[in-house]
Image (cartoon, rainbow, N blue to C red):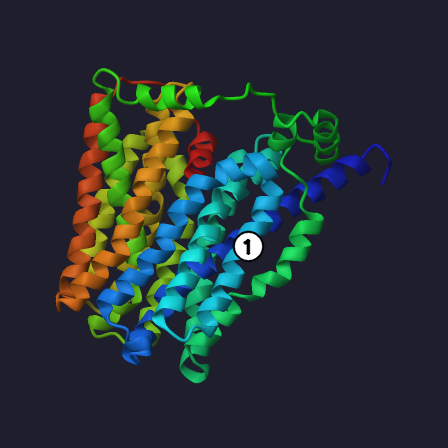
Amino acid sequence: MSSSLAPSARGSRLALLVVGLCWLAVLFDGLDMFIYGSVLPHLLATKTFGLTPDRAGDLGSYATFGMLVGALTAGTVADRIGRKKLMVACVTLFSLASGVCAIADSVTVFGLGRTLAGVGLGGLLPTAISMVSDYARGGRGALTIGALMTAHHAGGILSAYVAKWLVEPVGWRSAFWVCVLPLLFVPVLAKVMPESLSFLVAKGRTEEARALADRYEVELPAAAGKKTSADRWDALIDLFRGGEWLQTLLYWLASFGGLLLVYGVATWLPTLMRGEGYNLGSALTFVVLFNLGGIVGMLVAGRAADRFGAPRISALWFALTAAGVFLLSVRMPLGVTFLVVFLTGVFLNSAQTMIYATVSIRSTPAGRATAVGWTSGMGRFGAVFGPWLGGQLLAAGNGDWGFTAFALAGVSSMVFIGLAALRSARRPERSGAEQQLIAAQ
């Protein structure tokens, strides 16, 4: 190979390495997030810690509350210490927190472990997407980010197999010990991962950023003016000026219902399916199919939104999700149920992404980051409420209503995002790459 070609080949391999490291980190994120739902049927059946359905719902909400904290603080922390260090810290935190769950001798200690894990989980995904955005090679931004987001659902699939292979023969603690293993990945991440180009430029380390950009053969991000606290508050107030308050509220309500549905189903799907008469093996197979659907959905949603518009796709996806979730409350032949679970995963896991795309499309450039960030933050309260709601319904002996309640959340999000889109002025659609970028918020 000639010397003129060597830098290009080296840059390509290193850029792929950055994406690969982030993919593995998000895979571990998904494993840790979904593992609780995968072992929950066993915890309830064996009455571990005297666990009841309502208490189990509370525990599920602890992790999502931690994710709310992690997501809201990730940007501030990353601005101070750098995205690379934050990624290392997040993987370390949720791995150690799983160790706390594995050795827990009470429901209080177990809940603390899940809360701490949630903080790490909530901070990792937006940081990882920011990293791959910096290093995505020209013209491949949408493909790179879409591929990264499949890792979360791959982690969900892995969680089902971990539970299926280990929980019955070895015990539920073994599943959480598996979630500690990403600690072995931390030194590799710390040594090999380069720092974010955006962070280096923002900190004035321009020469270091330029050297990395040349090495990875990517475009150096433009320096942005530093935002003050007053700027951030002005952007937030703009969301409520004039008649904008109603549209903002509709977006927030749509996001609340969407994440209630996502995390409610993710936590309770195996348990609810067991309640419908399926054995544990089949219930965990549903988790696999649900997350396979999520992978497919993430790869096709952007293309559909490019063609038909993100608001339409978001509303349609939520309608199809609601129909799929409701059908799961009906006893059907096993093959049909498998198909419904897969299709529900396709639509559910990308419907929320399309809310963020819609908000981004309808926002002004100056206020876009604030609008999407707060829509995501308000939605996180739904993520906390969803697992709790499922637990309360099961505790009251109304497990059959679990799927109905989640389906109604999908219908509400369809209505709210549809009304918001009708009220907003028509603006040019964003590209598929941009729509997937804001899915990290």
Dividing the image into 4 quarters, which one contains the N terminus? top right
Kind of residue indicated by mark 1: Val
Eyeballing the image, is 183 above or below 88?
below
Q: Secondary structure at mark 1?
A: helix
**Is residue 119 visible from the viewing direction of this image?**
yes
How many numbered marks appear? 1
Outermost bottom residue? 169
Pick whichever, 430 or 257, lies toward us.
257
* Left or right side of 421 for 119: right
Q: Position of residue 68 (x, y in %)?
A: 38, 46
Residue tagged 1: 91
Q: Nearer the viewer, residue 190 or 320?
A: 190
Whole-percent x, y for residue 85 in the image: 61, 45
- Above or below: residue 420 compared with residue 344: above
In the image, what residue occupies the spot 62% across and 43% down?
84
Q: Is residue 84 above or below residue 416?
A: below
x 30%, y 51%: residue: 384
Residue at 64% x, 28% y: name it.
203
